[in-house]
Amino acid sequence: MKSYHLTTFGCQMNEHDSERMKGMLESIGYAEAPDREGADLILFNTCSIREKADNRLVGHLGEAKRLKTEDPERVIGIGGCWSQSMKEQVFELFPFVDVAFGPGQVHKLAEFLTSDSLTAQGYFEFEGFTGHLPMKREREFQAWVQISVGCNCACSYCIVPSTRGREVSRPSGEILAEVERLAADGVREVTLLGQNVCSYGRDLPKGAKTSFAELLSSVDAIDGLERIRYTSPHPKDIREDVIRAHAELASVCEHIHLPLQSGSSRVLKAMRRTYNQERYLDRVATIRDLVPDCAVTTDIIVGFPGETDADFEETMEVVEQVRYDSAFTFVFSPRRGTLAAELEGQLPHPVKRERMDRLVGAVQRHATDRAQRFVGRTMEVLVEGPSRTDPAKLRGRTRHNKTINFAGVAAPGELTEVEVTSATSTTLAGEERLLARLG
Ligand code: SAH
Ligand code: SF4
Ligand code: F3S
C-alpha cells in the first residue's frame, strides 16, 4: 500500500480541501503516513495570503527536496493558493515537484497518481468544488461545509480572487444533503464556508435561487444538528435577514465574524471594500439591536499603503466603539498581482509595527472586558477533548466561539452546561454543572 503525508497551511477552506484530498487519496488506496520520511507521496496544501505564509512554505519544501533526492521514486505535490499563484514558475523554481494544482482542480491529483505520467504536471483551471470528493473528516463532531468557491470582490490587497477564481455557489439541495449526511453521522456543529457567504446563491439559476438567510433556515431545520457557524460574511452584503437568523434560528450561534479591514472610509475606498465606516457601524448597530449578546469578531489590516495617522485613529475609534470579542490583526503585506502592491505610499516597517502594537493593545483590552460578561453564567459547551494546558481538564467551545477549559466528566462531542468562573481575553475557565447532567 502506498502512503501519503499532507501538510496544510492557510484558512478553513484549505483545511477542508485537505479533508477532501485525504478522502480522495484513501479512496485510491493510499494510507496516511505519520511523517514525511515514511511517505511515498509528500503533499502540501498551501496558502499565499501574506508574505509570511510564502516564507514558511519554502522552508518545508527544502526538506521535501532532500527526501526526494534520497528516494527519487517519491512524489512531491503542491496544491492550494500558493501553488495557483505560482503556476507560471513553480516547476522552474522547484524542479523536484512532480505535480502542482490549484484549489479548483484538487480532483486532478488522483488522476495524476493513477496515470503512468512521468513528467511534472500542473492543473490550474477553476473547475469547481472539492465538495464532490470523498472526505476524511478531521473532527468527529464538527464539520466544514463548502457553500461556494471563489470570490467576486476585488479587494485591492487580496490575492484570493486570483487563486480561487470567480464565485460559484453550490446548489442548496447538495449542501442540505451533505449536512443531513453529516448530522446522521453524529456531527453536532457545521461551519458553512465561503469567501463571502452573504452573496451566496446570487449566481444560481432562476428557480434555484436561494439566499444565504434561506439556506441558514433550511440547515437549521435539519434534525440532530445543534450548531451552525459560517465564515465570512462581507459587511457590504450582510442583511437584516441574516442577522435576524441569529436571534430566531435555534442552531445559529451567537457569533458574527464581520471583517472590518480598516475604520477609515478613505482607506476602505482604496481597499475597494465598497462600504464605509458609517455603513459598517450601522451593521454592528443592527446586530446589537437584534442579537444583543452576540459575539462580534473581526479582521483588521494595519499599514495599508497611504494609511495616515488620522486614518489609523479612525480604525482605533471603530475598535473602541464596537468593542470586539476578539480580532485577527494583520500587517499589510504586498501580494503579487494585486493593485495595492503597486500603490504609492507603502509604509515603513516601524510605523506598521507601532500601529499594530497599539491596535493589539486595544483589541486585547476589549476582549478581556467583554469576556467578563460570561463569568457567573452557565453556558452550553460542545466538548472537544482534553484541555491543552491541563490534561486533567476538558476543553470545549461556547456558542459565542469562546474556548473554555473546565473540570468535568463529559465526553467529546457532548453538549453540556458549564458554569463560567473566570475569563481572559482568549479563554474562559469553569466547572461542569454535574447536577444539571443528572437532573
Ligand atoms: N474572504 C474573507 C477573508 C479572506 S482572507 C473576507 O473577506 O472576510 C482573511 C484575512 O486576511 C482578510 O480578512 C484580511 O484581513 C487578511 N488579508 C488578506 N490579504 C492581506 C494582505 N495582503 N495583507 C495583510 N492581510 C491580508
Ligand atoms: Fe479577499 Fe475581499 Fe474576497 Fe475576502 S472579500 S477573499 S478579502 S477579495
Ligand atoms: Fe485561504 Fe490562504 Fe487561500 S487564507 S483562501 S488558503 S490564500
Image (cartoon, helix red, strand yellow):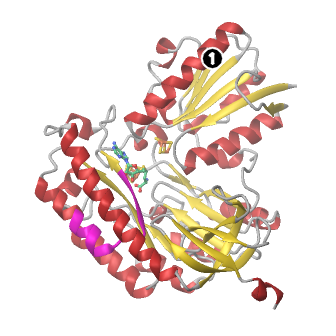
Q: Residue at x 62, y 60 (%)?
A: 171
Relative to residue 232, is residue 341 depicted above or below?
above
Relative to residue 400, is residue 349 depicted above or below?
above
Q: Give the image location of residue 386, x and y in percent.
A: 72, 60
- 291 to the left or right of 21: left
Q: Which residues are magenta?
A: 316-329
- Does the rendering let one see residue 324? no
Check residue 172 for magenta coloring: no
Res 158 quadrant in image? top left
Q: Give the image location of residue 246, x and y in percent.
A: 52, 79
Q: Give the image location of residue 331, x and y in percent.
A: 31, 45
Which element type, helix, strand or loop, lies under badge 1?
A: loop
Instruction: Tell me the quadrant of the picture where the N terminus can be found.
Output: top right
- Report the amino acid beneath label 1: Asp
Total of numbered circles in the picture?
1
- 171 to the left or right of 124: right
Q: Residue furthest bottom?
A: 439
- 79 to the left or right of 318: right
Q: Residue at x 16, y 50 (%)?
A: 307
Q: Residue at x 46, y 38 (%)?
A: 163
Q: Residue furthest right?
A: 1
Check disc 1: other Cα within 10 Å, few if <14, some if 14-19, many if 20+: many
- Which residue lies under the disc numbered 1? 98
- 84 to the left or right of 145: left
